[in-house]
Image (tube, rainbow, N blue to C red):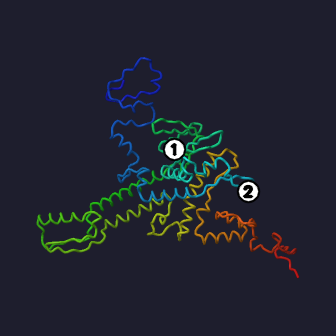
Amino acid sequence: MAPPSVPLVVSAEFRRTAAPAPVALPAVAVPRASFQDAGPGVLIQSSSDLDAYLRAGRESASGAVVNADAAMRTAVIYGSVRLITGAMGNTPLQLKRRVDARTREDASDDPLAKVLCRPRKGRLTPASFRRMLTAHLILRGNGYALIVRSLGRVIDLIPMHPDRVKVEQLDDLSLVYTYTRKNGQQIVLPQDDVFHLLGLTLDGYRGVTPITYAREAIGMALTTERHGAKVFANGTAIGLHLSYPNKLGQEAQDLLRASLEAYRGSENAGKTLITEEGATLSPLGMTSEDAQYIETRQFTRTELEMFIGVPGFMLGDTDKGSNWGTGLEQQRSGFVAYTLEDYYTAWEETITRDLLPDESPLFVRFNRNAVVRGDLKTRWEAYVKALQWGVYSPNKVLELEDENPREGGDIYYDPPNTAGVGHNGGPPLDKEDGNEPAQTA
């Protein structure tokens, strides 16, 4: 038996195989949490142990503890998450059905469309659901939801916080998920019952998060902001330098120090300072420490923008040029192509894998056109070209603009460079070369 100074851990196997007679335990105060099955875990015996566990693997070199919640307190991370999740929530998600190799039709009549595309009472709206799981994906590398089925059909998706979900890969390469409820009860879920949104992964079943690899940059941002806040809270913001022709006595120094207390804090910036003893005032420029502080903040912003994948101009960082393109429209298109497309594809493929049966004619897709539609003038110029080249019919344009169709609007015009050369009832081609229309009298 373990000595009284060591907490005793009694395994479930021991409890099952022990004799009916009661087991005498040492008369020591043993935390109830220490009575657990043998296995991976950390035994917490004091507040210092808890603090060490919470900091382990989360404390950056700057001394700041970095996790998902702390990262959201930085302006760049919060702004990036807001932009990406907002785009994922606002982009229309459409359920389609393959009729044949070339034809697709709307499948909003399928019950799955009610879960994915329509708001329901007592549940998150589809946009809020996508925002939530996308935020989990960005900040924690994984997004989970419990799949509820009835008669083989998906009738609900219940989001699960990734901090409460543990995923393991079995020897047969299948996955098993363990979800911990708020009351501490653990539920083991098979792979077929979990909607698992997975981002960048290094082992094939667990996603990695930029927060882990950007820990030092986020820690620097948190420390820099904390430093700036302390400077504004405790600094004297008079922006002047005082010089005296003679040496000040102790009483004069004490009076000067007491008077300067009235200028502490940012709310007192710009007040007029009254001097004595022949003091002269001269304005102070930006010190090298101030300049380094500003440069540090700008460099940290650029680093975090790179980790998350959001152009700086979308976060108010317009001081320098951008590698996303020369104009704002190009940078915006780059954001859609190189950042949002990753999340669009992840959602579409995960829905197909986890919610649709094999060989199903159904599929989902985000309407990317809704994101890159641009302003009204640019959009209508694109419609005119689509009409001229026979890509869209007038009724298709009205549909894209959420307007009712018109009679006779389901026609497709011939492209201008082919009109009159034998296509769709035009004059016949010249029989000799087949390139020019036949000449008529």
Q: Is residue 40 above or below residue 233?
A: above
Which residue reaches farthest bottom?
Answer: 441
Q: Which mark is residue 368?
A: none
Q: Position of residue 41 (x, y in %)?
A: 43, 36
Q: Which quadrant does the C terminus fall into?
A: bottom right
The residue at 42%/51% (across/down) is: 69
Q: Secondary structure at mark 2?
A: loop
In the image, is residue 373 above or below residue 66?
A: below
Residue 17: x, y in percent?
47, 21
Side of 414 relative to 382 (left or right): right
Image quarter of residue 216: bottom left
Q: Answer above or below: position of 78 versus 289.
A: above
Q: Quadrant of residue 264?
A: bottom left
What is the three-letter code of the residue carrying label 2? Thr
Q: Is residue 203 above or below residue 231?
A: above
Residue underneath mark 2: 103
Residue named by callout 1: 160
Structural crowding at the residue carrying mark 1, measured as other residues with C-alpha within 10 Å and reported as few (<14), some (14–19) or many (≥20): some
Q: Nearer the viewer, residue 282 or 355?
A: 355
Q: Residues within 10 Å of mark 2 (few under 14, many from 20)?
A: few
Which residue is at 33% across, 40% downward?
Answer: 47
Seen from the viewer's position, the closer of residues 63 and 144 is: 144
Q: Could you tell me how far apart the alpha carbons at marks 2 and 1 are, in whole angstroms?
A: 37 Å
Q: Position of residue 148 (x, y in %)?
A: 59, 41
Amino acid on which the number 1 mark rests in the picture: Met
- Mark sitting earlier along the chain (2/1): 2
Image coordinates of residue 255 in percent, x first then y, are 15, 65
